[in-house]
Amino acid sequence: MNRFPDRGFVRLRNRAYGTYLFADDDGAGVMLKPHRASLQAVWQVDRVVRRGRGYIVLRSAAYGRHLICATGTSWVDQSHEAYHTVQGNYNNPEQVDILWAPVHRLDNVHVVMLQGLDCQRILRACAPNTPFFRYVFVDAFQRSTNYGTMADWTVETIPVRPAPTVIPLPVPPLTEGVTPLIVLRRIKYVRADANGLFNPGAWLSWLFVGNSLLQLKQDLEMLLNVSNITMYVRAGPFARWTPLVIDLPSHPADMEIFVMTAMTPAMSIILAHPDFDA
């Protein structure tokens, strides 16, 4: 567990392919991609204790959603199926599909096998001769199965960025004359004070068009009649806050946004930004 300090930032690089556990642009899928210097390859660690044992929850530093074992399955090789992984919400204090237990390998302390609550499932890449080899799955752990290095993950620790990430400018369509897909989603928002405290009865909402973070910031400043805000997203009532510094995902799921105009030094430490370029 030393490789996963509470609130620490990590990348997980699969040893079979040398690619990273990556939160997909839609805010729902989880894939393997080579993009190391990307916020979508960064996961923040939340330590939890269940039944007297320590576990970790992996929260995307991009969208604030969590690495979850889904119920759907696909073929991971020619012999059997495994469960999909997705980005999901932390909705229940007893939720188990969100928990992982790192198991260090003897040959390399940087490598872990992430298993579920019952320690009978393992996070793994897919075999290269299948249509899903870029996806990440949760497989039933069998000691007799030779996973090779598909279930081995090198943990890369990421330092904290001294200043917040700059909000990106809107990106124009890659192809001229092509109308981009319009995304319509409900944004719930609330103002929080410098200590992160807020009135639970003060939530408001509106329908936001598009996925531009800069446009979202401008709209919220107009709605709240404030300026120079910082925004934080929460994926589920039991989730921690995540700084929102990347354009919104393409999936039109509702989002909860906390808005702050000032912050105490203690909150600045808690709501740190990863230096994903390091």
Image (cartoon, rainbow, N blue to C red):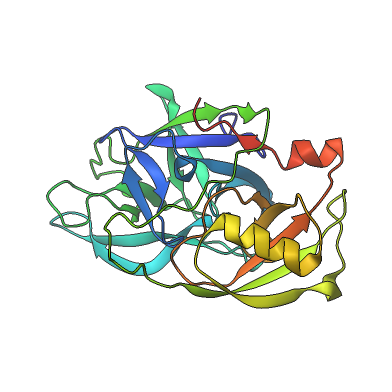
Image location (x, y in percent) of residue 87: 47, 59
In the depicted view, which residue is nearer to us: 21 or 206? 206
- Can see residue 240? no
* Residue 76 lies in quadrant: bottom left
Residue at position x 76%, y 49% in the image:
228
Q: Is residue 79 left or right of residue 126?
A: left
Residue at position x 73%, y 60% in the image:
258
Q: Is residue 247 left or right of residue 144?
A: right
In the depicted view, which residue is nearer to us: 105 or 123? 123
Image location (x, y in percent) of residue 147: 25, 41
* Residue 269 lies in quadrant: top right
Image location (x, y in percent) of residue 40: 46, 45
Residue at position x 68%, y 27% in the image:
162
Q: Is residue 56 left or right of residue 278?
A: right
Q: Is residue 142 left or right of residue 204?
A: left
* Residue 63 lies in quadrant: bottom right
In the depicted view, which residue is nearer to us: 122 or 275? 275
Up-down relation of residue 117 to residue 224 (above or below) = above
